[in-house]
């Protein structure tokens, strides 16, 4: 990497190099820092003690650490879902002027799925649905989460028959996880990891699914829309505002009020205001509004180095603190907006849905002001490096199921099942998560996906994998024939025709942000419920080929709870425990049907994923 | 340490030696394992990088780690308080036959302090109080915790004027902490540590204070009672049952039904059943029933090695998994009872308050069965090592305030304030927490306490420090004249006389278990509210001289929020961040009035604590 060789600051790849060699204990899950008798390094391998000072085994240590990773991810998605649940409640109460129910049909479908009364006004239904949502953050009713109703029923019963279901509140789930894993408490690896599965289910339903459900209700359900991707989407002569983070509650308002302040930008000498998206905020805006996908999370600092970025507006999650250092060397302003997230080097504008207009205008005005500051800086220079790539995004669950239903109303998923049975389609892989510099060096995601496509496996992507694939051109329908195998290509052409598109669907389907992994869950549910095949038998694999965040661990755990094989790279923090490795790669098959696949080499990962798919297809349909 | 030189297994001190040298990064707070780009070692010192791969500074890393430690401690005490809140609710609903409201007066006092109606039947008041308690685990009302009403009002307002107060639910507080500290989220050290203060307040009130309040209501308020301490309390010819963990909800029932099963024990050849206490369960039973204090948490394995222990019955927290290994070599049965806590090597009896009688009998019967198994083992031998020490325990806040009120009804705390002003009493130090093998080597607690006593400082103790001081003889009133300085000794004689005791109070006051740190908080509150001196100006220090558990970190944070100087050993995980060290040792003074003192040498720690007390006494009263 020579991109920063002339720069006075470090970029992610430099910092990764400085960090190496990284600690082998933390990497392998044998580091315990849970109490002040340690730190202890407890391993079944060569490198540590057999037992911690308290007597904890390698299995106890690794299982506790993993459970805490899951809990932190669940807590993150819960706060995300809580925000939109509270927005919907305020809409129902008539307290918000900037937000509305844009998808009353979807609201009613969700209400019915939750077992709620879906009759009456939009407001009445919104009130019931938001109440059910908010209940999922409150201990007390003694029953599991309302949003567990959105899980495939057969797998939900399969797990609850084994005593596996979340607590009555997702906050209690997280608090319980922290308590269970504290020193001298729960110590049995399998028991701890079962707790982790329950937290993963809470994440999948009261986090991801609730988040997507209610965001669609308020901001609209995505449909295919064209956009562009990479840092080339910035415009030298415009006020460039990058919205970064996760929640459309903020970024939809930045878009809205940027439009209103175009004249003000022109007064400041700009040709206009160009709002671009980073990380999952980028995905949220792209899938609903076609906003350009500027950068994934590990490229956010590079967006600043272009010199063209006037403001980076952040809400929650995946906003690396390195951005706070780098804006010191540029005219770019880093603006945080959520009161519980501060970043050194940022200025803060507290954003609240009740005052969305004034807050959003304040943010946009600061960006315009920064545009005016550009030439006051000695070091000011603009270098926008690339030509944007074309991408078709917004291939949502709703869109896909609508197309399938239109073609085959009796049994919408049948064409997919047929394609799997006939072997035209070898399987579906949800490829999700982050852009990890460790794996970026080998372009892990690109190599994995190209192999899968060539072998007729359909990749559906979310999160920063959405950015990587957009930048690689995989979301461009023009690439379908080049990249997809013969069988898959035919399927994509058929579906494109059924959808009334002017050509095939793109070889990789962009399903949105990380909470939109729920969309993949909904597709899996539809296929399972339509075909009668349990989710744990479907030829569907989840892969996080470059995971970074604890959120990826909780999402992956949800996939395991759904009964899917889960590929990850880097390897989960567990290699120093034979017991935890055995549980997650083998024993879990008899519990949820899911299991972990660890593989950091892209070619080997592709082979392992295809084998997992083949095994399931053969079990269902015989040799194809 | 030669105690285990003939044994085939390791004991805590051996494992500590094996663990050394321990990792300097984890120890100094510079190890970040929050995402899969790392682990990163980020330090302001010589030993690590300046920034993590994400750009996190040493301050970000250390503050996030500390905040998570606090959150885990808070989660632990919250679950403890939730259990007794649910028991009280079930009592009010008439659903329990083994539990009752034993202290209706205290129940009414608590109801009034919470601003609730205290009229009507005990059941009606219990219903209101339990409802207010359970509300503190439910997000939704938009207000802070009900139990914050139990905080000294002046300090509560001092903090809330600065925007510092807990969320509306303690579970949300914990979940929010986990979210804030995840990768790419809240990164500003001072902001993170303010979150930590809020979690510490949640711990102090919806954890500790609620726990003690409701346990006293259900099981009785402690009054001075004689007991004995150390492993010598076990009886060779009896069925020895050690109750270990934290909750009297279980252990009170073991006591009760052990009494009923004496005849069965005699049939099995035993002379009776001897229930002894380990860790905080020991403190709970000692302060209310005079049950012997067998061992602190790091001695629990030694209790097994005596060969006389038939069953160790565990509920939650501080039950080291090493016990599961060691019972494999003995006839002792390790019985876990709480469904979310399993330990390898244990058998499980699910204990529920609704079925307390049958569950407790099942547990006691297994112990009797184990007694019968003693002689079936080849390696069976009993060696009970010591003669028990005498101890007076149960010196509760209620008792102390009752004595003071009887002597001086107008202004109960005045004699304490006078003694401080005159210098007979140089200050009060709450010495709390764990027995850390690292500091046990130097007998940290004993040396610290002997110095403080000699200098007329009153130590009030809880938790496993209660065991250490009981074993050292410091809870024996016969030791008052020998250990206490002249001024303190006179105060202890005066109070003993005022209480109608046959001599002085002991030199060290045993205030109970770790949740009973709330009793120290109540004493501080009474002195502050009675004298009009804010808690942040009182000559009161908190010390955790041998801390182990994350719970000790949350308790200590609560003390900091109350405005107390906080001494800890080991040093908090922060030394590699100059910023975090500065915040906690200096900047915090201007926020809460509290600050951290780090000192692992007992003599130096005593000097530092006495200086902190002197500074406050002089500020209040001038040179004494």
Image (cartoon, coloured by chain):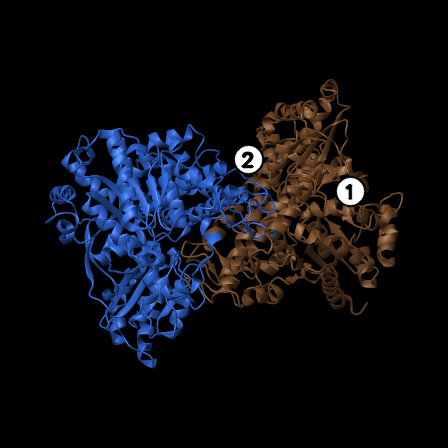
Chain colours: A blue, B brown
A209 or B46, which is in the foreground?
B46
- Determine the chain carrying the residue at label 1: B
Above-or-below relation of A23 to A258: above
Rendered image quadrant of residue A525:
top left
Q: Can residue A421 be seen in this view?
A: yes
Q: How far apart are marks 1 and 2 (CA)?
A: 31 Å
Q: Do labels 1 and 2 share a chain?
A: yes
Percent position (x, y) of residue A520? 28, 42
Judging by the rendered image, the residue that carries numbered circle 2 is B342
Sequence order check: which comes first, mark 1 or mark 2? 2
Q: What element carries label 1?
A: strand
Left or right, B514 with reference to B394? left
Left or right, A477 with reference to B379? left
- Determine the chain carrying the residue at label 2: B
Judging by the rendered image, the residue that carries numbered circle 1 is B393
Give the residue displayed 69% in from the left and 55% down from the top. B543
Above-or-below relation of A66 to B267: below
């Amino acid at each position: 990497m020579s991109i920063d060789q002339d720069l006075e600051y470090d970029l992610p790849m430099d910092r990764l190099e400085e960090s190496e060699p990284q600690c082998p204990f933390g990497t392998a899950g044998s580091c315990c820092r849970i109490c002040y008798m340690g730190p202890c390094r407890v391993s079944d391998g060569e490198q540590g003690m057999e037992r911690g000072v308290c007597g904890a085994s390698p299995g106890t240590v690794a299982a506790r650490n993993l459970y805490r990773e899951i809990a932190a991810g669940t807590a993150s998605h819960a706060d995300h879902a809580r925000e939109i649940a509270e927005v919907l409640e305020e809409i129902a109460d008539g307290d918000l002027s900037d937000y509305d129910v844009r998808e009353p049909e979807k609201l009613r479908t969700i209400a019915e799925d939750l077992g709620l009364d879906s009759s009456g006004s939009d407001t009445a239904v919104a009130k019931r649905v938001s109440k059910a949502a908010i209940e999922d953050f409150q201990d007390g009713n003694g029953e599991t989460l309302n949003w567990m109703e959105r899980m495939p029923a057969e797998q939900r019963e399969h797990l609850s028959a084994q005593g596996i279901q979340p607590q009555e509140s997702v906050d209690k789930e997280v608090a319980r996880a922290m308590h269970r894993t504290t020193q001298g408490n729960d110590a049995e690896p399998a028991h701890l990891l079962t707790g982790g599965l329950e937290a993963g289910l809470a994440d999948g339903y009261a986090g991801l699914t609730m988040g997507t459900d209610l965001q669609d209700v308020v901001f609209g359900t995505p449909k295919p829309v064209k956009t562009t991707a990479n840092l080339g989407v910035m415009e030298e002569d415009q006020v460039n505002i990058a919205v970064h983070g996760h929640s459309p509650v903020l970024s939809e308002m930045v878009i809205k009020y940027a439009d209103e302040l175009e004249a003000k930008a022109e007064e400041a000498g700009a040709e206009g205001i160009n709002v671009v998206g980073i990380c999952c905020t980028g995905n949220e805006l792209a899938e609903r509004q076609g906003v350009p996908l500027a950068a994934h999370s590990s490229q956010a600092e590079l967006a600043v180095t272009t010199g063209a970025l006037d403001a980076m507006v952040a809400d929650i999650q995946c906003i690396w603190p390195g951005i706070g250092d780098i804006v010191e060397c540029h005219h770019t302003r880093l603006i945080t907006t959520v009161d519980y997230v501060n970043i050194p080097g940022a200025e803060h504008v507290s954003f609240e849905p009740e005052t969305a207009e004034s807050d959003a205008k304040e943010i946009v005005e600061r960006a315009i002001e920064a545009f005016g500051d550009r030439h006051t800086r000695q070091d000011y220079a603009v270098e926008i490096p690339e030509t944007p790539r074309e991408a078709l995004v917004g291939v949502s669950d709703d869109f896909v199921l609508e197309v399938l239903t239109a073609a085959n109303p009796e049994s919408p998923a049948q064409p997919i099942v047929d394609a799997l049975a006939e072997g035209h389609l070898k399987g579906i892989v949800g490829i999700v998560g982050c852009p990890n510099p460790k794996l970026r060096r080998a372009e892990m995601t690109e190599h994995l996906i190209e192999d899968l496509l060539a072998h007729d496996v359909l990749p559906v992507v979310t999160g920063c994998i959405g950015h990587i694939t957009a930048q690689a051109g995989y979301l461009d329908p023009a690439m379908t024939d080049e990249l997809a195998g013969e069988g898959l290509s035919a399927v994509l052409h058929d579906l494109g025709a059924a959808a009334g598109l002017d050509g095939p669907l793109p070889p990789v389907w962009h399903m949105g942000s990380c909470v939109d992994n729920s969309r993949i869950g909904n597709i899996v549910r539809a296929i399972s419920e339509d075909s009668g095949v349990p989710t744990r038998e479907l030829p569907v694999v989840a892969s996080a080929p470059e995971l970074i965040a604890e959120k990826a661990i909780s999402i992956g755990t949800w996939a395991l709870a759904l009964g899917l094989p889960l590929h990850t790279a880097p390897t989960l923090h567990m290699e120093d425990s034979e017991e935890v490795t055995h549980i997650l790669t083998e024993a879990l098959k008899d519990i949820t049907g899911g299991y972990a696949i660890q593989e950091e080499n892209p070619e080997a990962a592709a082979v392992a994923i295809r084998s997992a798919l083949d095994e399931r297809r053969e079990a269902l349909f015989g040799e194809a």
